[in-house]
Amino acid sequence: QDTSTGAVVAEHRTKKGETHVMTHNPQNAVVHVGHSQGVVTLWTPNMSSAAATILCHKGAVQAMKVANNGYTMATSGAEGRVAIWDLRNYKLVYELPTFAPASSIDISQTGLMALGINGRVQIYKDETLYMTHMLQRSNINQVKFCPFQDVCGLGHSNGLSSIVIPGAAEANFDAFEANPFETKSQRREAEIKQL
């Protein structure tokens, strides 16, 4: 759907079963769709069939995230594994076993990966466990890193929490790419240039 006019640009039937998760690649705007058969399909508006199909898991895809660089994708399967994929060649980079399926994944600006698993948050730096945090009597629904801040927000069954994750954010921001301190007139000017 074109968000500026509200017109439907394209509508596709995946023919891959139920769709549990969907995200997009921030670099090329390709839509990634996770299905109940463990398959991730990549969609563009101008193609009637999937641009690529990747068999990621033996169980249903539970969560998915594409990193800001545009070529790293993390997926979580119902079988209790998190897989990291290289989207340049659609190859598996590595897998991490988890004690339960991760219900939410996010990747920070510096490449740290947060997994929300039941009432626990696990932060990974590459393949190693970096930090872990446990919530009492609460299940995590969503994990999300704050840009340009070493903070991870946690949406859970009892509300919202935040934890400090050292080294998660980009310390030196590029004002041409994203300016967290932009004024109202700067934002208007940027929108005009983008149009």
Image (cartoon, rainbow, N blue to C red):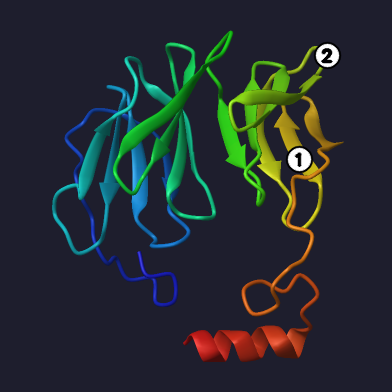
Q: Please give the count of numbered marks on the rendered protein.
A: 2
- Residue on which disc 2 sits: 136
Is residue 157 something one can see in this rendering? no
- Residue 53 sits above or below residue 43 on the image: above
Residue ranking furthest to the left: 48
The tag earlier along the polypeptide, 1 or 2, is 2
Measure the alpha-carbon separation of dots 1 and 2: 16 Å
Residue 154 as seen in the image, left or right of residue 166: left
Check disc 2 and report its element: helix, strand or loop.
loop
Q: Position of residue 31 (x, y in %)?
A: 35, 51
Decide if residue 93 is in sight here: yes
Residue corresponding to mark 1: 153
| Rendered view: 38 above or below 154 | above
Identify which residue, 16 or 96, lies in the foreground.
96
Identify which residue, 156 or 132, lies in the foreground.
132
Tell me if 112 is positioned left or right of 69 in this view: right
Amino acid type at circle 2 is Gln
Q: Is residue 174 left or right of residue 42?
A: right
Q: Inspect the image, locate mark 1, and give the three-letter code of the amino acid beneath it.
A: Gly
* Crowding at mark 2 (Cα within 10 Å: few <14, some 14-19, many 20+): few
Residue at image coords 77%, 22%: 132
Q: Residue at x 59, y 8 (%)?
A: 99
The local crowd at label 1, few if under 14, some if 14 to 19, many if 20 or more residues have their Cα within 10 Å, is some
Residue 124 x/y as whole percent:
66, 29
Closer to the camera, 49 or 83? 83
SS of the residue under disc 1? strand
